[in-house]
Image (cartoon, rainbow, N blue to C red):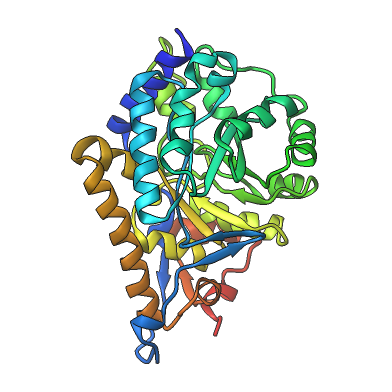
Amino acid sequence: MTRAKRKLEHIKYALTTGNNGQAGFADIHFVHQSLPDLSLDDVTLNTVIGELYLSSPLFINAMTGGGGAKTQEINEQIAIAARETNTAMAVGSQMGAIKDKSERPSFEIVRKVNPDGIVFANLGSEATVDQAKEAVEMLRADVLQIHLNVIQELTMPEGDRDFKGALERIHAIISSVGVPVIIKETGAGISMETAKKLASVSPFAIDAGGYGGTNFAEIENSRRKRILEYFNEWGIPTAVSVVEITHGAPSIPVLASGGIKGADDILKAISLGASAAGMAGPLLKTLMQDGLDALISEISELKEDMKVMMCALGRPTIQELQMAPVMISGDSFHFLKQRGIDTKKYSQRT
């Protein structure tokens, strides 16, 4: 099967498998504040991650590209929505366009329609320095995402089977590419052990990419003759992964993605230590089912809902929201307790 055809299958399966609701955010509960002493007009959503300024903590995470005219159309519409809502966006893996130049337009359209927006390029950890530079050049990207997807590759019938030297390649890219580099998972989450390893090469940020969102193992299993069922529920829930990363790499900014369904999940992720949160599957579904105008409205409403909830919590900025008290219960509590993380510090913050 060609890479382009596989990209189209990924879109189809992503829309049908959806979000399983197991990202862990149901275990996170804000402590209500009856005297927030705040006006809604005082709430601001802008967040700063290193030298990167975002107008809100929401970014549109990697979805597609490299699948011909259909993925070019999707990326064009997402880029328009990003432009109209002043929202950062990432593209899907650009390796297909690096190997087949005819696929470049499906990515280049993003910068064409959104010339002044913040755009994330995207490659896997198998990429070379030269390929990373080409991916950035293709989009005139502000940031490069390097994705880790061992479980997807092992489940994919034609996927990679050799993952040696990934950290060394990532280090070489960070040292040479000339833009900030984010390391992200793609649905299995990042543990504190992995976060410590990544911290040793000083990435710009680490994106949890946790379990609970688009399930690429399940998608790839849909394409297999012999299903690897043990990978369908493999991974660290996103909420837990955010906490794990903050403990494994306390000096590295954290991003949250994987199963983010609404404004409340974004704010919960921030309260656990994230600086921003990415959505992909729910936004793709809105675009495909209801069109571009509906996608623009949804992004705008997400931002408005974030401001309303921050007002209720008495937290006018993203930085202050990171210190809002939250209770951690259920499986997330037990997971973190077994991992030696004291959850009381989250509930007793003032």
Q: Nearer the viewer, residue 221 or 250?
A: 250
Q: Is residue 21 visible?
A: no
Q: Look at 52% across and 26% down and name the residue there.
A: 152
Location of residue 53 in the rendering, given as x and y in whole percent from the top left corner: 57, 61
Q: Is residue 171 toward the left or the right of residue 320 in the image?
A: right
Classify residue 29 by image quadrant.
bottom left
Q: Nearer the viewer, residue 94 or 263?
A: 94
* View extreme (top): residue: 1
Location of residue 91 in the rendering, given as x and y in whole percent from the top left corner: 48, 36
Q: Look at 34% across and 89% down and name the residue there.
A: 34
Q: How many marks?
A: 0
Q: Is residue 343 visible?
A: yes
Q: Is residue 29 toward the left or the right of residue 348 in the image?
A: left
Location of residue 193 in the rendering, given as x and y in whole percent from the top left corner: 71, 47
* View extreme (left): residue: 290
Query: Where 41 sits versus 92, above or below?
Result: below
Query: Where 258 sits versus 222, above or below?
Result: below
Location of residue 281 in the rendering, given as x and y in whole percent from the top left corner: 36, 40
